[in-house]
Image: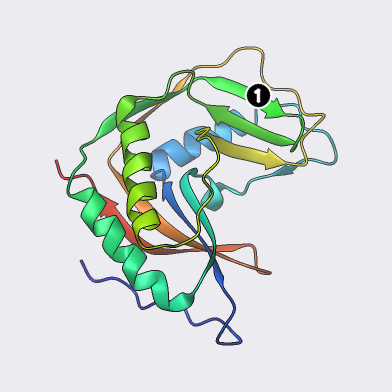
Amino acid sequence: MSLPPPPAPPDGARPLRLFFALWPGQGLRAHLVRHQALWHWADTARPTPAPKLHLTLLFMDGVAADRVQALQAVGAAVAQHWTDFALTLDCAGVWRHGGIAHLAPSQSPPALLALRAALAAQVGQLGLPFDARAFAPHVTLARKAQAALPPTSFSPLHWTVRGFALVHSVLGTGRYDVLGRWPAAS
């Protein structure tokens, strides 16, 4: 797989905000958008645009641009040792503290936890910074959504996870650039 070259920061030295994520295909993305439409949003809520819907596996802030290739190698190495798995998003809620409206699994499959742990271990071995807080898998549906009301009932979304991605959150633009994608080994 040919990977894109590392991004060049505008000032040549600005660290990057990167994350490994489960990146939904078009079908699941459409289901997520339909689920967003079931919510009652307050005026302050900022729903996540469809192209940005994802589940973050590992967030890394302050990464030097010259380390992107090492992270691409991590993605390739980890992808060789995991297989597809099923994920059910069946819990809708809002974290009042941060105002994050989200859709999450009621139970995290062991394969999801193992994938996250493998990425964290590899990134840690490189000595790169990453968010080491307890993993709370979720898809962010909106921000500033403290007053949002989730649907009282909905059909769970079933996701067959077949790969993951390395993504650059481009500061000041609201843009996500996918820097690499890796399918499962199976």
**Residue found farthest to the left:** 186
Which is more toward the observer, 127 or 60?
127
Reading the image, the residue beneath label 1 is 93
Look at 78% across and 41% down and name the residue there.
144
Local SS, label 1: strand
Displayed quadrant of residue 114: top left
Look at 27% across and 64% down and name the residue there.
73
Look at 84% across and 41% down and name the residue there.
44
Q: Quadrant of the N terminus?
A: bottom left
Rendered image coloring scheme: rainbow
Q: Amino acid at mark 1?
A: Gly
- Say if 42 sits above or below 130 in the image: above
Displayed quadrant of residue 139: top right
From the top left corner, tell me how far across and down residue 104 is, in percent.
Answer: 52, 27
From the top left corner, tell me how far across and down residue 68 is, in percent.
Answer: 39, 70
Look at 24% across and 35% down and name the residue there.
84
Which is more toward the observer, 148 or 17?
17
Q: Quadrant of the C terminus?
A: top left
From the top left corner, tell me how far across and down residue 170 is, in percent.
Answer: 58, 68
Classify 10 Å Cα crowding around label 1: few (below 14), some (14-19), many (20 and above).
Answer: some
- Say if 106 sits above or below 173 in the image: above
Total numbered circles: 1
From the top left corner, tell me how far across and down residue 26 is, in percent.
Answer: 41, 45
**Residue found farthest to the top:** 153
Q: Is residue 169 left or right of residue 67?
A: right
